[in-house]
Image (tube, coloured by chain):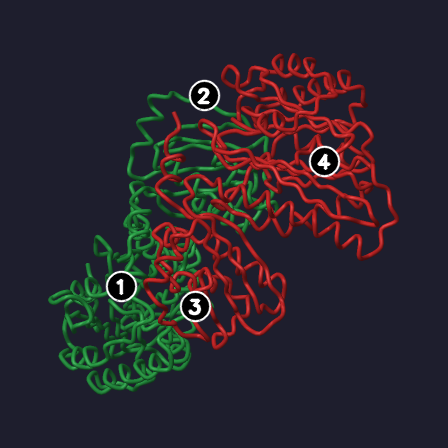
Chain colours: A green, B red
Amino acid sequence: MQMTDISGVFASGVHCGIKASGVLDLAYIFVPECVGSAVVLSQNAIRSVTLDHNETVFNTNPIKLMVINSGNANSVTGPIGKTHVNQTVATASQAFGCKPSEVGVASTGIIGVPLPIDCIINGLQSFSGNEKNGDACATAILTTDLVKKTAARSITIQGQTVHFCGITKGSGMIAPNMATTLGFIVTNVAINNATCHQMLQSAINDSYNMLSVDTDQSTNDMVSLQSTGEIALSLSDTDQKAIQHALTELCIDLAKQIAKDGEGATHVVEVHVLGAQSKNDAKRVAKLVVDSPLVKTAIAGEDPNWGRILMALGKDPSVVIDHAALTIDVNNELIFSNGAPHHANKTQLAKVMKHPTIVITIHIGNGSYEATAWGCDLTHGYIDINTAYN
Amino acid sequence: MQMTDISGVFASGVHCGIKASGVLDLAYIFVPECVGSAVVLSQNAIRSVTLDHNETVFNTNPIKLMVINSGNANSVTGPIGKTHVNQTVATASQAFGCKPSEVGVASTGIIGVPLPIDCIINGLQSFSGNEKNGDACATAILTTDLVKKTAARSITIQGQTVHFCGITKGSGMIAPNMATTLGFIVTNVAINNATCHQMLQSAINDSYNMLSVDTDQSTNDMVSLQSTGEIALSLSDTDQKAIQHALTELCIDLAKQIAKDGEGATHVVEVHVLGAQSKNDAKRVAKLVVDSPLVKTAIAGEDPNWGRILMALGKDPSVVIDHAALTIDVNNELIFSNGAPHHANKTQLAKVMKHPTIVITIHIGNGSYEATAWGCDLTHGYIDINTAYN
């Protein structure tokens, strides 16, 4: 399903003129009866004015309308950047019949170049506001992504079907600039701003924040959640847990699609860490392994290199590693067992390393915490994409 | 000069049989009258038994003898690893006439494979202990380094000439395993263990610890300092500062040689950060920029990409960046000035980007702290070296 299959969610995308002729570059997601919303923004100290705007409005009231353009990040363009956000918001609020404080904005693409604001204004005025074209919306937010990225989760709560639908983009490059990740999620379950924020932050912590293509982060990254309010229930703890689980699973699905489309990637990498003494330790180790250039190049070379995995998992001396319990397998083939190399069947190992998804499972001790991180391998493709720029 | 030019320092290297026929793979540095020594060890939680040994003996007394082998890291080989360290130390102490607690050890090369201990024992017994062959020593510690790395600094203190001489290795790969960095420094100025440690740690903080080829760190990394005690002076504060400066400069020289020989590197990268509100902020930003894969690939593509530099310097939200003061130049060509892109002369910019050393200078505000980090670009060469393994 796509997000416009949810009652009360309208979305579409058009070509407004930022990108080459015919390529979709302006999208909206409109939830006219929105009862709650939240946004998680990039922590980068250098950030787009679009994020400043969102930080303010998402704290004020439910955000009914998201306006998204691709091809230009509206970042580091000087004072004109803020003016362009204001013009976009003013035009959109008039066109869609909502208050300026109910409009969020997102931009992705080249930085340091002023937004072609006339294109945006004309594009916004071309929408009717009641389009049900989730596909065009999911397409219009892409930059150099090779594929569109959408995900959905549905669960039954008190006999009613709760949906979460999301779209995301990443992580390609535009001309001389930087990768960006954006995500937009809608749901029909009625949750207010505070609950939206709490649930979205929790989901992001276990999904987007555990994803890394190259450890670099964008000035424009953001993920939003909007609720149509259709299904208003008094939620039990169990219901809330089920809803949180569905949202987290959806975010993981989107994050994995980004990893799969990572620049130059030939393998998706999933690192499970088990037996940690804290959740934080488990996350730290999973990220160290998934981020290690030597682990990433080993996987590109289809090398089940336990030496590099050991090196990477030991990089943070504050994490407690029980050497005697240390066990590693790759796609269910044991390569390191209870502190010593395990002489695996080489033919079988070579075979599992050819799989497009490499799952590395690491037991670092006998604690009860675990975590998972996602990423991709590091190949000549990454170097090709990121050394060529004009 | 080389380290054996210092009176009371003996060193050499031989082929003992770990590596291919004729390739030097066993070295020693012998300072029979050593009055002080110190070592700085890898912080990796997974570390070689050689480091455990050094942690003990360097805390006990001045270390007269360093025994170094290349081709095998004696790491993650199980209980036999510790036995091999003990056998190495016992043989060396007999051969050189010193106590076992006066012998330090260092190994670099493949991990997970037991040390061919007979080769080491025979090799150690072939030394006379009074060789003056610093060149063979500097060669025997290398793995896949393309060049030998030595540095020296001399200063005059109270009319006497104080020398520091050092050798280092890194950062190539051995078979399926990991990069390692080792460094060994000797001096003729009399400084005790405590002073050696304090001075070495300070020098390492501003040199090796500000160096990154790929953010991955070894299980075997270590740098040692040994003093012959020849020049025993009562040092004034000014003298101490001058000596510290010479040692730090020597460590920076060695670290830069490693960056230059970084796997696949076509440019050395030096990032100066100025105007920070603390030393820590300055270091953090310098490392974030030098470590960024997108900055590294931009430099490989000879692209003076201020967008990627901005993205990287903003990655730690705890660092205070004064956007209005933010100014960046590359090899003295201004590319970003007081918070806005600077339209530099493109021909001149293209020219400076071809230089083998790229110096990026970043003013992040009006604070008084600064720091420098060193690294290299990220190229197809790095991918070639690290995806190929057997």
Return the residue at label 3: B334
What is the C-alpha distance between the residues marked 3 and 4?
A: 47 Å
Q: Nearer the viewer, residue A206 or A292?
A: A292
In this rendering, which labeled residue sits more in front, label 3 or label 1?
Answer: 3
Return the residue at label 1: A160
Residue at figure coordinates x 30%, y 44% from the top left: A265
Is residue A119 toward the left or the right of residue B358 in the image?
left
In this rendering, which labeled residue sits more in front, label 3 or label 2?
Answer: 3
Residue B38 image position (x, y, % from top left): 74, 39
Tell me the crowding category of disc 3: few under 14, some 14 to 19, or many 20 or more residues within 10 angstroms, Cα based: some
The relative height of residue B46 versus residue B284 in the rendered view (above or below) is above
Which of the 4 quarters of the picture holds residue B149?
top right
Tell me the crowding category of disc 4: few under 14, some 14 to 19, or many 20 or more residues within 10 angstroms, Cα based: some
Q: Amino acid at mark 1?
A: Gln
Return the residue at label 2: A343
What is the C-alpha distance between the residues marked 1 and 2?
A: 52 Å
The relative height of residue A50 versus residue A214 in the rendered view (above or below) is below
SS label for mark 2:
loop
Q: Amino acid at mark 4?
A: Glu
Contact, mark 4 vs mark 2 (Cβ under 8 Å): no
